[in-house]
Image (cartoon, rainbow, N blue to C red):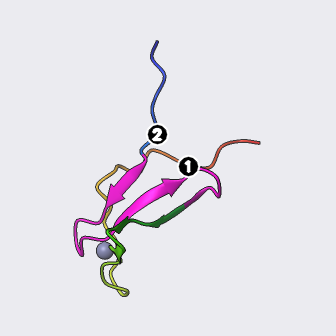
Amino acid sequence: MSEIEPPRKRTCERCGRQEVWDGDRDVWRALETDGDRRLGQAHCLHEWDINGTYSPIAEG
Ligand SMILES: [Zn+2]
């Protein structure tokens, strides 16, 4: 089995924003930890710790 597991979580290396993949809505959303949302900085050009080759858009 060589099925590629898509990333479920990503972290901005610049501001520390953390997002998790919401498979129901097909969107990234901010991770909440103990009610505290890891939003990072609003004006940050987020540099995610996952590489850019993965596309979450699946053909339908
Ligand atoms: Zn950022």
Asked if residue 44 lies left or right of residue 25, the reply is: left
Mark 2 lies on residue: 6
As measured in the structure, the alpha-carbon distance from the residue carrying label 2 to the one carrying label 1 is: 8 Å
Foreground pick, 10 / 38: 38
Residue that lies at the very extreme toward the top in this rendered image: 1
User: The disc labelled 1 sits on which kind of residue?
Assistant: Pro
Q: Position of residue 41 (x, y in %)?
A: 31, 84
Q: Position of residue 34 (x, y in %)?
A: 31, 69
Whether residues under marks 2 and 1 lie with C-beta atoms below 8 angstroms apart, the answer is yes
User: The disc labelled 2 sits on which kind of residue?
Assistant: Pro
Foreground pick, 45 / 38: 38
Q: Earlier along the polypeptide chain: callout 2 or callout 1?
A: 2
Task: Residue 19: say if magenta.
Answer: yes
Q: Is residue 56 above or below residue 2?
A: below
Foreground pick, 14 / 32: 32
Mark 1 lies on residue: 56
Asked if residue 32 lies left or right of residue 21, the reply is: left
Q: Residues within 10 Å of mark 2 (few under 14, many from 20)?
A: few
Q: Which segment did they paint magenta? A: 8-27
Q: Mark 2 falls on what kind of element?
A: loop
Q: Position of residue 3 (x, y in %)?
A: 49, 22
Q: Is mark 2 within 8 Å of ligand 1?
A: no
Task: Residue 23: say if magenta.
Answer: yes
Q: Position of residue 44 (x, y in %)?
A: 32, 81
Residue that lies at the very extreme toward the bottom in this rendered image: 43
Q: Is residue 25 above or below residue 1?
A: below
